[in-house]
Image (cartoon, grey):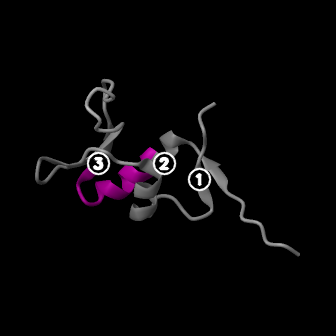
Amino acid sequence: MSKTTKTVPVTRRAVMQRVNRKLGQRKEALRAWRTSSNDYSVGDLYHLDFDANAVLDVNVDLEPFAREVGALQAWEAIANDT
């Protein structure tokens, strides 16, 4: 029997909510820019620290970041919005 790795699709919104629940314990949050960030090359998401009142990172890639904070498991992947 061959082993195949199957991934379960999770919506981007669900992953954002999971990440923010994890970050909320540390008084941090992951947010999306309200305006188009293409002009500034800063990406779509940014990471905030409420205690320091600072932006920690401006070019956040959601999937690796979610895995790093424990919000996305190895068998899960962000679903493509089609």
Residue where numbered disc 1 is placed: 77
Is the residue marked by circle 2 packed among few (<14), some (14-19), or many (20+) residues within 10 Å? many
Q: Which quarter of the rendering shows the N terminus?
A: bottom right
Residue where numbered disc 3 is placed: 29
Residue sitting at 63 percent across and 62 percent down? 75
Left or right: 59 as drawn, with respect to 75: left
Left or right: 74 as drawn, with respect to 47: right
Question: Which callout, 1 or 3, points at the residue further toward the start of the chain?
Answer: 3
Q: CA distance from mark 1 to mark 2?
A: 9 Å
- Principal SS element in the magenta part? helix
Magenta stretch contains residue 77 = no
- Looking at the rendered structure, the secondary structure element under dot 2 is helix
Magenta stretch contains residue 26 = yes
Give the residues in magenta.
Answer: 16-28
Q: CA distance from mark 2 to mark 3?
A: 13 Å
Q: CA distance from mark 1 to mark 3?
A: 21 Å
In the rendered structure, find residue 15 and report the number of the disc placed on it: 2
Q: Position of residue 35 (x, y in %)?
A: 30, 24
Quadrant of the rendered structure where residue 79 is? Answer: top right
- Looking at the rendered structure, the secondary structure element under dot 3 is strand
Q: Amino acid at mark 2?
A: Val
- Asked if disc 1 and disc 3 are in contact, CB closer than 8 Å, the reply is no
